Image: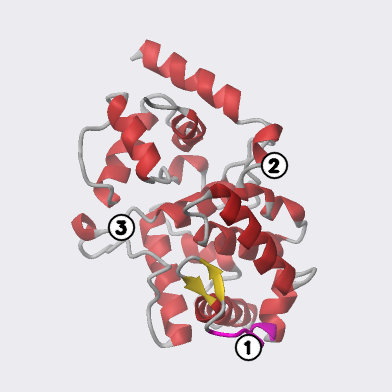
Amino acid sequence: MDDLRGYMDALVAKNNTETFIKDDPVQFPHRYSDKRDVEIVSFLVATIAWGNRKMILNNANKMLDMMGKSPYDYVMSGGWEKIDEAKCVHRTFFGRDLKYYCRGLSRIYWMSRIGGIGRINGLEDIFYNEEHDVWRGIQNFRNLMAEANGATSKHISNPCCDEPKKGSACKRLHMALRWLVRNDGIVDLGIWNRLKPSDLMIPLDVHVARVSRELGLIDRKSNDRQTVELLTARLREFDKEDPVKYDFALFGVELM
């Protein structure tokens, strides 16, 4: 295990650098200083972060250009109401999906401002609970977005907290949470402090799953919530306080 940990730590050191930012979707939340802008951009960009990397970066640029200097002001002013619902934003994410996200975020920010969602004072509080259960936080976020729109969205994955064995890996949401919670002073922004890096789950995509199996970290075949939990538990053996830092290692491994 020590050899594998050393190998993984070396990959983290190699990839978790400032040069990583310019070719990764994390570059977009780095462009903003207002906490609410960073939050909105993190979730929107993470939501379209699948497929060809160059296409992701180009489409994220176009989406944020549409929102002007402050995505928060754009969301709260209702500028998104004018979006063409049939417009392709990124692959299967269309104008109607962007409107869904903006409508939901607008309601969450408005309701938290007037104290209309329990004791929630902002977006971070939706994901926080005393058990430090990020799956429950994701479920809470998904439910609130559905309430604002009258329906669920395929672009906000379902962790199935009532039946965890059926839960999605929720890769893109875990990636946004990584950006917002981890604060290493390099790549991740760490603007949230109620959740801790030790609470996070690994963002699991096809490549990360394949690398993890090749390295013997997991042997389960499905890329779902259970596999995320198994892999994250394995990574906690290397660093219990910050297991998700190994996303930089698993991302960077090139397999034959």
Question: According to the image, label 2 marks what residue?
Answer: 22
Q: Quick check: can you spot residue 191?
A: yes
- From the viewer's perspective, tell me whether residue 173 is left or right of residue 214: right
The image quarter in which residue 255 lies: top left
Residue 154 picture location, percent across and down = 38, 71
Mark 1 or mark 3, earlier in chain = 1
Give the residue drawn at x 56%, y 81%: 99
Could you tell me if the residues under marks 2 and 3 are in contact, i.e. CB atoms within 8 Å?
Answer: no
Task: From the image, state whether disc 1 or disc 3 is nearer to you.
Answer: 1
Find the magenta span and give its range. Answer: 79-85
Q: In the image, residue 235 lies at what x, y percent? A: 38, 30
At x 57% / y 64%, what residue is drawn?
A: 44
Q: Which disc, if any, is residue 168?
A: 3
Residue 49, image x and y in percent? Answer: 52, 55
Q: Is residue 109 above or below residue 172?
A: below
Q: Is residue 217 visible?
A: no
Which residue does the image show at 62% across and 65% down from the upper left?
40
